[in-house]
Amino acid sequence: MDRNSSPLTESELHRLVDQQAQGAERAALVARLSQDPAAQATVAQWRQQRDLLRGLHKVVLDEPIPPTLMAAARQTVDSQHALQQGWRWGGMAAALLLSFGTGWLTHNEWPGQRGGAMAKTTLTADFVRQASYAHAVYAPEVRHPVEVAAAEQDHLVQWLSKRLGKPIKVPHLSAQGYELVGGRLLPGEAGARAQFMFQNATGIRITLYLGAINPKANATTGAKTSDMDGQETAFRFATEGAVPSFYWVDQGFGYALTGPLKRDALMQLAQTVYQQL
Amino acid sequence: MDRNDLIAQIPGLRRYARALLGNSWAADDLVQDTLERACSKWRLWAVGSDLRAWLFTLMHNLYASNGRRVVRSQQAGTRVDIHDVAHELVAPDQAIDLGLDLQRCLLMLPEEQRTVLLLVNLEDMRYEDVARVIGIPIGTVMSRLSRARTRLQSLMDAPALTPEKRAVPGASVSPLRRLK
């Protein structure tokens, strides 16, 4: 009888609430609980708390998985398959396949990475949001979409390189049907940012937004200080803004290609830009 | 390893990360970093072992090594106390309100308590598994869980104070005092 009426310990209360006690253990705990009004109150409170917590962000469970996460999951599974296949054919093949499979998509996760992944993502999140805003503001502009038009491309490049503290190149997207409209200078947290605008024959405009991500990178020497080593991210797709973007960070410099296009089309353009810069 | 097994874990990881960080941007980025880390560490995963526990371990390690930095950067700039901007907020319906309040209180818990509380409640993870995911003894899991539950209760019970009320000490006769 002693055992049956002894007060429940906190651990036992947790085990009850979290349903980690099963069968006979659970029955015994329930029996003792019935003798213990103080414990009953605690259990009731914790159960209510548990129910509340379980309702938190429940909608996320039913949301479609964002494409970037799907892509990352696919990448992971593919690299593992590649690895397993590689083992069948020998260690060399495994190493090769793995490095192709994971490639630059994961390079920001290797040791030696400087900025914390999450501090970094807050910065890049702000960056890509600003890119989206800048696109939404200037792309519909009829008379003054750019400050310096494509006709003065040399001047445009020189000017923006000087203001951003880094030699800048304008990518050529004519093969993809997009011609340069021009560019403009914009403010950003870490100093000046630039926006290049392109337009295709049907009048769709895409913008490339670029600039230093980290305030420390805004030295006049450009981004290639030792501080910026490893400040790189994978290609990422953002749909949070008004217009979707593909963005990436290379040596502390952020790039976002924004336009009202489907993910695949935008990604192909982003890859073209990435290769040219 | 089936692709679908991994994809099936993503919604749970996303929800947990969102509750942990209170920010959907940062949460999805944490999930993406976790998946990318999984990609580079496949060799360390024993086929047939608990995939979910392994992914949560990766996520926890990423969070633990980066979390503090984020908190600091948020304090430096963008983070505001919801009380201070209460007048700017439009009252949402009650269910959303409750969720917001719960999330606010969660974020006020020390991160080591929040982690344990969420893994146990949201993920239904067994205490032994929580201990393994976080890398702490099971006794520590239990004591953190106790502290988290007590603390969350007192945070939730505390009335949502307006800045004026908060400025008057001793105005509340509630037996539960909010700890700053």
Image (tube, coloured by chain):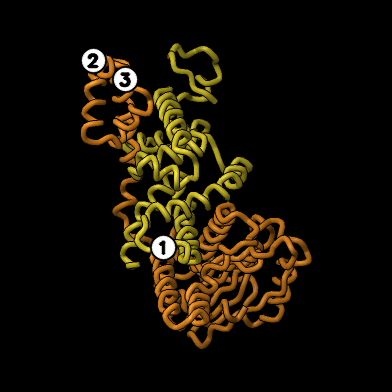
Which residue position holds label 1? Answer: A69
Report whether residue A141 is seen. no
The label shown at residue A255 is none
Residue A19 in the image: state x and y as whole percent: 28, 36
Q: Colour of chain A?
A: orange
> Tag 3, which chain?
A
* N-terminal-most mark, 3 or 1: 3
Estimate how packed mark 1 is, as few (under 14), some (14 to 19) or many (20 or more) residues with alpha carbons within 10 Å: many
Estimate how packed mark 2 is, as few (under 14), some (14 to 19) or many (20 or more) residues with alpha carbons within 10 Å: few
Which residue position holds label 3? Answer: A39
Q: Colour of chain B?
A: yellow
The label shown at residue A1 is 2
- Residue drawn where x is 75% and y is 64% of the image: A225
Residue B167 in the image: state x and y as whole percent: 56, 19
> Tag 1, which chain?
A
Which of the two residues, A217 or B114, is positioned nearer the viewer here? B114
Location of the C terminus of chain A by quadrant is: bottom right
- Residue drawn where x is 45% and y is 41% of the image: B115
